Each structure stands twice: as C-alpha cells, then as structure tokens.
Amino acid sequence: MEKYNIILLGPPGAGKGTHAEFLVRELGVEHISTGDMLRAAVAEGTALGRQAQTYMEAGALVPDEVVIGIVRERLLRSRPGRVLFDGFPRTPAQAEALEKVAEEVGLPRALVVYLQVSDEEVVARLSGRLQCRDCGAIFNRRYDDLEAGAKCPTCGGEVYQRDDDRPETIRRRLCAYREQTEPLIAYYRQRGQLVEVPAEGDTIENLAARVVAAVRERHS
C-alpha cells in the first residue's frame, strides 16, 4: 500500500474525532491534533506556545503563522512516517503552508477525506449532546436516554447542555465553517486529493468501516 498522510475534513459534528480513532487503529498512522499541539506548546512554554497563549486567553483565533510554526516544530521533533491531521488545516492558506512543511519534513502527499453530513444531521447530533459538570463525560439524547438536569451515569453529577450545543449556536458555527473551511473542499478536489464519503444514516461502526474502506480503495 502506498504511503500517505490523511487530512479529515467535515463540518462540526461530522464525527472527525471518532473516525480519526478508527483510522489510526486500522491504518497505523500517527494522530496529530492541532488542539493538543497548541495546548502542549503552551504547557511547555515555548516561544510559539507563549504567542498562542496570548490569543487563546483573549478568546481570539491563533494566527496561521503561529499554528503553522507549532505544527512544524512538532513534525521536526518526531519525524513521523505517516500522519493523520485532525483539526488542521482549516483554510486554503493553512493548506498551502502545510504542503511546504510536509515537504521540508519529508512527509508523503496527503489524502483528504471529506465526511459528508447535512446541516440537519449536524444540528440533530450536536443539539442532542450533553455533558457532565463534574467528570466531563459526554452523552447524547439519541442514544443514552438522558435529558439536561439528569444525574450522570458515570459519577452522579449533573448533566447539562453546553451553550455551544444549542441549535442557534450550531447554525452560527456552520456558517463560519462554510466561510472559512469549506473552500478547502474545492482546493483539494482540484488537486485530485479528495475522497468524499457519506457519513450519516448508519451506525457509527458501519460509517467508520466505510471511511476506512474508501481510504484503502484509493491507495490499494
């Protein structure tokens, strides 16, 4: 099988984290989350980490050049063979910068998996999400027979709905996604790197198997 990196694209609620877990396990790629990298750089007190912390504490987006710098440092330090990028890139500018960094580090060309999920499904998934105030466990009304205010089955704490998971907030997030991230779909399609996979209407296990199969078929 040809070597490749994987980039996961899709709207909020598409299941990128879940599919990343399956792909890492099935294909043996290294999972790199930009959120984790940012937090690690801040905790380590690196120069870029301190810059990122300034923006994060102000509730602002971390600029592209800082994110790219942190990704570059991480890749140069570990020199992974194959990588699954989760949460990055988010814009065409980040995609172009990532290509340069990947070439510098010696990473192979990326295969970009676009998880296709309708707006209606995104709202249904995320607005059903609940979280425990005490232990942080995540639940969903669809599957866990819980409502806000119930006791957490794990620790007994109160289960609540985050503001980010309210339908009106979700629709605003979808608008931001279309403006900022959706252009990446056309960007990678034009380069012949995009694999489009329907990611709704079935069990999580079947959807994950579909994604893995699509990646393997592209590179068999």
Image (cartoon, grey):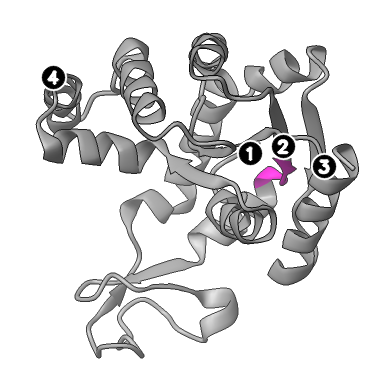
Crowdedness of circle 2 by 10 Å Cα count: few (<14), some, many (20+)? many
Label pair 3/1, CB-CB below 8 angstroms: no
Q: Earlier in the sequence, mark 3 or mark 1?
A: 3
Between marks 3 and 2, how big is the CA–CA gap? 21 Å
Query: What amino acid is at disc 1?
Result: Gly
Asked whether 38 falls inside the magenta stretch, the response is no
Q: Earlier in the sequence, mark 4 or mark 3?
A: 3
Residue 16 percent across, percent down from the top left: 58, 49
Give the residue number, with chain letter if any, for mark 2.
114
Give the residue number, with chain letter if any, for mark 3.
1
Q: Quadrant of residue 161?
A: bottom left
Label pair 1/4, CB-CB below 8 angstroms: no
Residue 159 is marked as none
Residue 72 percent across, percent down from the top left: 38, 20
Between marks 2 and 1, how big is the CA–CA gap? 6 Å
* Mark 2, secondary structure of its residue: strand
Asked whether 118 falls inside the magenta stretch, the response is yes
Stretch in magenta: 115-119
- Nearer to me, 95 or 152: 95
Query: What amino acid is at disc 4?
Result: Ala
Q: Quadrant of residue 76?
A: top left
Q: Earlier in the sequence, mark 4 or mark 2?
A: 4
Give the residue number, with chain letter if any, for mark 1.
10
Regarding residue 203, the answer to whether it shows in the image is no
Mark toward the viewer: 3 or 1? 3
Which residue is depicted at the point 39% across and 35% down? 78
Between marks 3 and 1, how big is the CA–CA gap? 25 Å
Query: What amino acid is at disc 2?
Result: Tyr
